[in-house]
Each structure stands twice: as C-alpha cells, then as structure tokens.
Image (cartoon, rainbow, N blue to C red):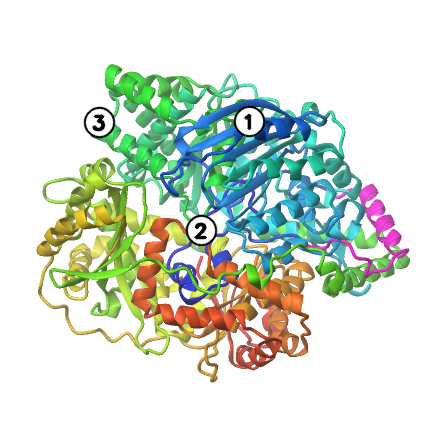
C-alpha cells in the first residue's frame, strides 16, 4: 500500500522489464515490478496485552457459530502504484481546446440533487472549469473539474488521524476494498484489476488522511470504478468480518497445537519490510521527533511491535468515526458529464446525516520547540565490514507552527531546488564533496502535511564525523544566506521549475490525480482547494520580486527565518547495530511464547481450527453469481485494433530519424540512440558511472556547475542511460546507449548543442568527483537490496538465463555492487587506468555509425528541428565502431540466496519457456495476468501473508518469472509457484470470467500514455523489431483467448517447475532453515 509516497522505477534489469512489456503486449505484473513503495511512517514502542489476547480468542470462538466459507471480504490491493507528490506541475496539454459546459443548467440540477455551489473558478493553468459544491445534508465537499482530458479521475479522501502506531488507517485502507454491500465478494478490487480498462486503481495512507483514487479513459468503465469505490468506503463488509481484519491486519497463526504460534497479516508483514530498511527507519524517527505532540508523532502505517495491540472493536470504531461523508473531500476531473457525477454522489450521500467527524478529525498543529533536540537510534545492519563508517545523520527543521501562504510556499520550493535540486546545487554538492559520507539522506522540503519541514543529512558517515556533518550543514546554509546564489543558478532553477509546471509531464500517473493531490494538500485542512492549482500569478510575482530586489533579498531571509534562526531543529543519528534484527526477532518470539503458555489446550485447539478456517476461506473462490455483481465491460467496448503512433522514418546525414507528429504543447522531445555492441564486456560495469560522469563532470571551458546550470537554463533536462533487452528470435541482445532530452521549440538548437557538448567535450579528469559517484552508487545499491529485493532477485535470475540479463546485471545487480566495492579502492590506486577506460567507452559508443534519432513534436516543430539534427550529426565522429564484442556470457545456473539483515523475504523462480518449445501467442498475456491476480494473489498474499506475489513473462527473452515481495515465507512460496501448472490444468472458467481477463489484459496493453511516452514506446518497438502487424496479431490472439489456451500454457510453465532457477533475497535465519529442510538447496551469498 502506498503510505505517502513511492519510489521511482529501479534501474538495470528492472528498467528493462518495465519498459518492454508494453511493446508487443503487457501485463500488470510488470508494471507492479517497476514502482515499489517507499512508505514513510515512524516507529513506536510496543508490548503484549493479555486482555486483548483474551478478546482475540473470544472473537475466534465467535467464528465457530458461522461457516468458515461465509462470504465476506478477505483481501485488499497490494503493490499499487503511487507517486512522490511534491512540486508537481498542473497544466493539461491534451489539446488546445478549452473545456465547454452548460454550467448554468448544471447548477440548477445540482440544487435539485441536494448540492450547494460554494465557488466556481476558471483554472487557466489546466484549461479547466472547477466548481466546489457542498452536499447540504452531510456537508461533504465536492470539487468538480471539467476539461477535455479523456483520462478521467475520481477520488474520495477522508481525514484519518491516528492516535497510536497500531496502523488502523493503513489496515482499514486495505480492508474496505475487500467487499461491500453492493459487491459482497471477497475481493472486488481484484475483479477490477482483472477486468477493467483503468489507468489508475489504488489507495494511499498518509499520516493524516486516506485517499481512494481511480482513473479511466473509458466513461462506462470509469463510472463502474467510481461505484465500486464509493460502496467500498461507505459500506464495507470488513467492519462486520473479523476474518478480514485478521487477514489484512494481524492474527495469531497456529497450524498445529504442538507448533509455535506466529504473527501473520498482510499489513503486519508489509511493515516488517518497511522497518527492515534503514532509510525508512530514519524517516519515521525523524517525523516522530519533529512532531512529538500531534498525530504525526505516531505511525499511521503501523509499527510491527504495535500492530498486534489493535483490536477489532477499535478497527470498527475508526471506520464509523472517520469514514463518513461529513469528513470526506470528493474529487472529479475530466471530460465526463459533470451532472452525472452529482447524480452518482447524491444516491450515496443522501443515505447519511451530518456527523461530528470534521471536528473530531482536525489535525492540531505542533508547537515550535524553544531549543533544538537530538535523537540517537539504532538500525539493523549486517555483520562484518566497517560498521564505524555506517552511521547516518540527518538535521531536520519544522519550518512553521502554522500553514504557509502560497507565495511563501512557492519561494521555499524554489529555495529547496536551489539548495538541493541538481548535482550542482551548493548544499548538495558541498555535502557530497566533503567526503564525510557516501550519499545524502533527507528529502529537503516536505510540504504535504499541515506544517512544512526541511531535512538534510548523510549516510555512510564515520562515527567520529557525525558532528562535522551537522556543522557543515549549518555553515553552508549560513554562507548561502550571507552570500546568496549565483544568478545563473537562480535562472536555471526558475527555468527548470517553470518548464515542469507548463509541461505537466506526469508520466503514467494521471494528470487529474496529480492535480487532486495538490489541491488536497490545502483542502484537507479546511483551506482553499483552488489556490494550489493556480501557480501562474504567484510565479509571476516571485519572478518580479527576484528581478526587482535580487535573489539574495528574496531567499536569504527565508534561510535565516525558517532554518538558521529556527529553534525547532532535531538532529537524528542512526547507529548500525548487527544484533538489532535478531534481538527484535527474539523479543517477538518471547511474546508469542508467553501467549502460547497463557493458553489452555482448548484455546490452542480453537486457534488451530481458526487458522485452518481462515485459510479455507481465503482459498475458496467466490461463486460465479457473486463475481457477476462487479460491473464490467463487454468485448464490444474494446477496440479491435491497437493504438498506432504516427511514425515517419526520414534520413538526415545518413542517419535514420524517427518522427512522431503529435501535439506536445510546443515541447520537443528527442532521443539519440547509439549502438553499444562494440563495447568490451569488462567495461560494462563502468557504463552507469560513465553516464553519470557525462552529466556531472566539466569540460575544458566549463566546470560541471556551469554545465549543469546551462542545461537547466536552456532545456527541460538531459539524461543518459543504457538500454538492454533480448530480441525474440535472435541470439544477440539489443544494447543501446540513449541520450534523452527535451526543450521548448525555441530552444531545440540549444538542446542539441548541449547534447554534443556532453558527449564529446566532457573531460574525465575529476578523480574525487568520480570517487563520490562510486560511493553514491554503492549506497544506492545497498538500499535497493534491502527495499527492492524482488528486483535484485529478478535481475540475478535473468543473468543466469540470458545474455541481456547478464549485461543488465553487470550494470545494476549484485555483480555491479561487487564491482563498486572493488572500484572504491581502485580509484586512488589506478585513476589513470579508470579515466582511460571511460575514454575508451566514449570512443566505442559515440559515432554516426549505428546512430538513430527519435523525435516527438508537432509537424512544424519536427520540420524546424531538422537543421539542428543535421548540425549535431556533423559533429559526431564518422569513424566506424570496432567489431562487435563477444558478450555470450551468463551467470552459472544454480539456486542462490542473497542474505541480508531483514525481517521479510523476496523469493523468485524463473525459466526460459521458449527453450522448452513454447511458441509465443497473445493468450500468454491474458494467462500470466490471470495467474497473478488469482492463484498467486490467493496463495502467496492472501493465505501466505506476503505483501505481494506476482508473475511476469518477458516475451522478448522467453523468461517466465515468479516473484514475491515482503514475504514471511520462503520454501512455502516456492511450493505455490510449483503448483501453478496443476492450477491451470484444473481451472474452470465461465464466459464472464474469461471476458474480464481479456479486457483487463487489453487495459494493460492500451495503457494510457502522454505524447512523449507514445514516441518513446514507438522507438522501443523499432529497436526490438516489433511491427504493427505483429501488434495486431497479438491483439487478435488476446481477444480470442480460450480456456484451452490456459490448459495448454500449463505445459509451458511446467518448465519453470522442473528446470527453474531460484534466487531469494532473504534473512540468514530463513535461508539456514531452508537449507536444513532441503539440504544444500541454496548457495549462500552475503553482500552487505
């Protein structure tokens, strides 16, 4: 569950996985692989409560009065996509037309439906008309935003401030989506995942609110989603079903009275994973320390020590109290009928009377401290290595005791970008260049809660340097307040932020949802919901102030008032503790041991029976009549042809140029692609650092600060990264270096000039900066292993099964981490050799031969760009690349366990099903998605207790993979994977279920894309040889999928059962237990 924010997609193999699945088809699983959650909730203490234990047993006994198969909700969404919602742009560029509505008529109808219009405003920034209504009977507030964006968005948000760290808001967020009054099946959310065209389907738990958003471009589908969500939050079955509470929150599990009792629960295990990650622990400690007196001082996500304190009665009461229309903010956005929105809402809201919830849910502000504070905590670390250099320190400020006005917020946002937004930003640069730590921690300014905060620090710090880090932060801020920022830096920040605001490129995240989350940031605190949507006027005022008074007069007082002279400062030091994980585990076992000792034989028998009843209920499918209650589309609603991106291939100076004529609001997007196949394989691990060096080292005429500022002033950004994939039907992989950039149409010449400068003029001479890159990369990889172990396992399995996987793993997996650990020592010993290798990579990659350029813009801007492309190509070397390198390498086959200090596991198993004779058919996309949403969901998540279980089929390589996420099990999960062929062979599907599976798959294949993404996807298809004819063929195969295809696919996945390779990222204890149970099953590898 997203708990406030989400990580950006991982790199290496995971990037390859996520980019490729949409090319000739797609699965939801691959998208879930891409974006893993980074919940930010803070720890709290816990103890066992005997009275609540007895109450738990009474509730178990009450279940014996009813059937274990009683139809009530059991499960909830997992691994649902989220975003980091900070300074997000808010304009819409779907087309230049203004939205037009018969507003007067709409408001007459609104009155009749029971709504009072509070305000109506035109939002020029997003070409929208927004109307704020109040439901007269309940006081619910509704923002209805009308425009011509086809990607319609609905959201309902409740203020849900917790009083403790038992995780009630989070568990409830899971549970309400597990069946409702109108949809009384176990998991209507999963049915929507299976058979909807949604472009977004999710829920978020913040520290003080819970959001339930959906989006779709199909109006019928959109209203289906809205109805299911409204019924779920207002009339959930979970408040009457103790077993849902057990499933999603926590329960004692006992399979046999002779065995030990354990804790299980989806949220419980999810938060165990969160509390295994040092950065997350730091964030939670920080929030608790900054807000000791209000709701932010506890963890709304739940502390694993506290979650077992939560009772079912408290859970039910929380829903009754806060999930009420009087406490709701409801959002609609898009091109649907605004009157229909109100009709839908009135049918639900009229069933309620006003409540006192708005007063009870108010968030009280934290009063500012009179003097700074200091906190020291420990985090679980691996044994071995130099623990003295693994400390973390972060300095944090609460900026104000009340919400800030928009003008001040905007100025602080610019200040934050000036301080930390780019590698050249002074606070970021000085900290990293100091050598006091490996990488930054703290996210700078956070303004999503009632009161804004600012955090900055370092990790990988020596114990003796903790105070030096704090002193350096304070000194740097003081110097910046006294000296101000360079005019070039201010111009670069201004251009960057203004470009982002006007472009409003939210990626696959719906623009209307981005808008909603900005508005909610004020609205939820009873402030103006329109204000955050209108950036133009405050932006112009800020620009005018900077021009008139100078940047120092604008920004220095902000640094002094909100940071330097602010006594509400908390310094948090995190100390590595190799014993913490085992100590916490021992405490939990001791609590459970005492629980068991306090039970009678009758209690234990009852608990074992309840455990079996719960599992039986979880694994029993809903009857067809219940499934049919969930609204769905028919195949008649599905376009028979895939969406084709306009593509014209031209030639400039002998180089192919792909042109995509699409409306982009005067932004030009460009990708310059170079062939990597001549690169020596021993240089592959250097490629990510080479890419970083191109963007963060200087030329003979400019240092890297000047170059970085020039990019910020003239463009919307430039990135450089490798791309690797298998190509179906070919032995050699596709390996490319992509230089990606964007600029306003009037700056295209600058864009290509800067690309040329980066590729050819940057000098690899800055040894100390390169050493920083190595430390930063090593720190990122270590964090990724702890937080995204599934991606590490996937990369490792791929590296054992195909060459493309091996290449990616060299640049982003365990092999890459090991390379970085060695390289850190070599930078001082052999810098000349490393610098020479970087130059060799440049010579191998950048030439006109094998180059390809991809352009996305409207026709006029495409034509105008040709002369700049020609000039850019003239500067490229024409010398042919060296011969293709020999990369026919893989990691040795064999099961492998990567052991790390963690309380949860990530378990993978893969095989190449093409090698066993499987021939690709579009039905594989349907079947893979169905396996993930049924068999794996039920067995790995619902009854297994993992946060997620899913499968993925890379149709380019033929690798079929199973993966689990934050999983309490290891061998049990592998048994589930191996049961998949039998599941498919025994499967009985009715027409409705099959149709839903097909429609859901088409929804993935046709995932909503903004213009730049359409152009980029077209480039990927071109590189991988996926033709429009093949796409049409796969679509026809998807639409004609039969039950027979499911049965036949069982033979394909039998190869994974029989020949699959297993990689797990897991705790030492669980790996040792697995090897004891299956002697020598895992080769054990320790990397942290």
Label 3 or label 2, whichever lies nearer to me, is: 3
Is residue 43 something one can see in this rendering? no
Q: Can you name the residue that lies furthest to the bottom here?
A: 917
Residue 707 is left or right of residue 620, and the answer is left
Q: Position of residue 643 (x, y in %)?
A: 41, 59
User: Is-magenta flag for residue 126?
Assistant: no
Location of residue 107 (image quadrant):
top right
Q: Earlier in the sequence, mark 3 or mark 1?
A: 1
How much space separates mark 1 and mark 2, taking CA atoms?
55 Å
Tell me if label 3 and label 1 are in contact, CB under 8 Å: no
- Indicate the secondary structure of the residue bearing disc 3: loop
Label 3 or label 1, whichever lies nearer to me, is: 1
Mark identifier at residue 468: none
Is residue 681 something one can see in this rendering? yes
Residue 743 is left or right of residue 501, and the answer is left
Residue 631 is left or right of residue 13, and the answer is right
**Label 2: which residue?**
783
Q: Is residue 892 above or below residue 536?
A: below
How much space separates mark 3 and mark 1, taking CA atoms?
52 Å
How much space separates mark 3 and mark 2, taking CA atoms?
34 Å
**Label 3: which residue?**
486
Q: Earlier in the sequence, mark 1 or mark 2?
A: 1
Point 37% across, 37% down: residue? 465
Q: Which residues are magenta?
A: 48-75
In this view, the residue in front, 576 or 535, is 535
**Label 1: which residue?**
104
Q: Position of residue 876 (x, y in %)?
A: 11, 57
Point 23% across, 50% down: residue? 693
């Amino acid at each position: 569950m997203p708990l406030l924010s989400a990580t950006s997609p991982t790199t290496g193999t995971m990037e390859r996985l996520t980019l490729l699945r949409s090319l000739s088809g797609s699965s939801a699983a691959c998208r879930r692989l891409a974006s893993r959650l980074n919940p930010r909730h803070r720890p709290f203490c816990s103890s066992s409560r005997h009275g609540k234990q007895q109450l738990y047993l009474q509730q178990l006994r009450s279940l014996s009065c009813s059937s274990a198969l009683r139809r009530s909700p059991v499960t909830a969404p997992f691994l649902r996509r989220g975003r980091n919602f900070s300074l997000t742009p808010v304009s819409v560029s779907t087309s230049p037309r203004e939205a037009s509505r018969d507003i007067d008529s709409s408001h007459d109808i609104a009155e009749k439906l029971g709504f009072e219009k509070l305000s109506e405003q035109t939002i020029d920034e997003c070409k929208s008309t927004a109307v704020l209504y109040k439901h007269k009977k309940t006081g619910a507030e509704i923002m209805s935003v009308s425009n011509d964006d086809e990607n319609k968005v609905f959201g309902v948000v409740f203020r849900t401030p917790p009083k403790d760290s038992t995780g009630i808001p989070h568990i409830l967020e899971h549970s309400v989506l597990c069946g409702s009054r109108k949809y009384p099946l176990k998991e209507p959310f999963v049915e929507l995942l299976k058979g909807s065209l949604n472009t977004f389907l999710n829920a978020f738990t913040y520290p003080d609110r819970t959001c339930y958003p959906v989006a779709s471009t199909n109006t019928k589908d959109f209203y289906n989603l809205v109805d299911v969500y409204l019924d779920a939050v207002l009339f959930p079955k979970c408040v009457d079903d103790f077993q849902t509470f057990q499933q999603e929150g926590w329960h004692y599990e006992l399979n046999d009275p002779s065995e030990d009792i354990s804790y299980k629960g989806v949220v419980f295990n999810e938060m165990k994973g969160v509390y295994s990650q040092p950065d997350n622990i730091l964030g939670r400690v920080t929030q608790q320390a900054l807000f000791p007196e209000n709701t932010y001082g506890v963890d709304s996500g739940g502390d694993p020590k506290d979650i077992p304190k939560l009772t079912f009665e408290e859970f039910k009461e929380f829903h009754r109290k806060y999930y009420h229309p009087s406490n709701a903010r409801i959002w609609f956005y898009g091109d649907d009928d605004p009157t229909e929105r109100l009709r839908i809402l009135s049918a639900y809201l009229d069933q309620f009377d006003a409540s006192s919830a708005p007063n009870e849910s108010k968030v009280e502000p934290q009063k500012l401290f009179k003097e700074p504070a200091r906190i020291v905590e420990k985090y679980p670390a691996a044994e071995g290595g130099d623990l003295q250099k693994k400390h973390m320190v972060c300095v944090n400020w609460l900026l104000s005791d009340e919400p800030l006005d928009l003008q001040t917020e905007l100025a602080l946002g610019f200040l934050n970008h000036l301080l930390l937004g780019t590698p050249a930003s002074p606070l970021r640069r000085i900290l990293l260049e100091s050598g006091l730590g490996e990488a930054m921690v703290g996210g700078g300014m956070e303004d999503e809660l009632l009161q804004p905060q600012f955090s900055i620090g370092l990790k990988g710090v020596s114990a003796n340097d903790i105070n030096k880090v704090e002193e350096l932060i304070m000194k740097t801020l003081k110097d910046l307040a006294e000296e101000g920022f360079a005019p070039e830096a201010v111009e670069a920040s201004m251009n960057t932020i203004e470009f982002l605001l006007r472009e409003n490129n939210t990626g696959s995240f719906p623009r209307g949802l981005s808008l909603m989350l900005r508005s909610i940031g004020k609205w939820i605190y009873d402030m103006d919901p329109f204000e955050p949507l209108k950036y133009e006027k405050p932006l112009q005022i800020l620009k005018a102030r900077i021009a008139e008074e100078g940047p120092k007069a604008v920004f220095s007082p902000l640094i002094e008032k909100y940071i330097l002279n602010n006594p509400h400062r908390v310094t948090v030091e995190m100390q590595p503790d190799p014993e913490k994980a085992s100590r916490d585990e021992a405490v939990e076992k001791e609590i459970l041991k005492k629980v068991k000792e306090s039970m009678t034989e009758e209690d234990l028998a009852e608990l074992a029976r309840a455990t079996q009843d719960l599992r039986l209920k979880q694994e029993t499918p809903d009857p067809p009549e219940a499934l049919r209650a969930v609204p769905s589309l028919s195949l008649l609603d599905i376009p028979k042809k895939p969406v084709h991106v306009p593509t014209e291939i031209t030639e400039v100076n002998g180089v192919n140029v792909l042109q995509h004529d699409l409306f982009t609001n005067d932004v030009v997007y460009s990708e310059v692609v170079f062939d990597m196949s001549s690169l020596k394989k021993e240089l592959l691990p250097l490629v990510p650092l080479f890419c970083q060096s191109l963007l963060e080292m200087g030329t003979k005429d400019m240092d890297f600060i000047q170059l970085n500022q020039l990019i910020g002033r003239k463009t919307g950004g430039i990135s450089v990264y490798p791309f690797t994939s298998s190509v179906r039907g070919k032995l050699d992989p596709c390996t490319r270096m992509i230089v990606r950039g964007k600029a306003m149409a009037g700056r295209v010449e600058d864009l290509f000039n800067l690309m040329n400068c980066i590729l050819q003029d940057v000098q690899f001479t800055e040894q100390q900066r390169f050493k920083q890159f190595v430390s930063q990369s090593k720190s990122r990889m270590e964090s990724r292993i702890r937080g995204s172990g599934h991606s590490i396992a996937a990369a490792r399995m791929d590296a054992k099964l195909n060459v493309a996987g091996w290449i990616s793993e060299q640049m982003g997996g365990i092999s890459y981490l090991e390379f970085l650990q060695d390289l850190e020592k070599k930078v001082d010993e052999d810098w000349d050799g490393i610098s020479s290798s970087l130059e060799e990579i440049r010579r191998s990659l950048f030439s006109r031969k094998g180059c390809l350029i991809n352009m996305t813009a409207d026709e006029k801007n495409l034509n105008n760009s040709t002369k700049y492309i020609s000039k850019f190509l003239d500067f490229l070397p024409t010398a042919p690349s060296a011969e293709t390198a020999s990369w026919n390498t893989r990691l040795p086959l064999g099961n492998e366990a990567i052991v790390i200090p963690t309380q949860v596991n990530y378990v993978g198993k893969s095989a190449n099903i093409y090698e066993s004779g499987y021939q690709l058919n579009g039905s594989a996309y349907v079947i893979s998605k169905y396996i993930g949403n049924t068999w794996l969901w039920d067995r790995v998540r619902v009854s297994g207790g993992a946060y997620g279980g899913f499968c993925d089929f890379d149709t380019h390589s033929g690798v079929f993979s199973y993966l689990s996420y934050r999983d309490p099990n290891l061998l049990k999960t592998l048994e589930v994977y191996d049961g998949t062929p039998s599941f498919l062979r025994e499967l009985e599907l009715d027409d409705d279920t099959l149709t839903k599976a097909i429609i859901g798959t088409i929804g993935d294949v046709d995932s909503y894309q903004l213009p730049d993404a359409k152009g980029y996807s077209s480039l990927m298809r071109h590189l991988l040889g996926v033709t429009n004819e093949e796409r049409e063929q796969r679509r026809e195969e998807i639409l004609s999928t039969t039950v027979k295809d499911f049965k036949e696919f069982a033979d394909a996945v039998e190869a994974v059962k029989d020949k699959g390779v297993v990689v797990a990222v897991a705790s030492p204890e669980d790996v040792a237990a697995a090897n004891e149970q299956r002697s020598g099953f895992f080769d054990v590898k320790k990397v942290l």
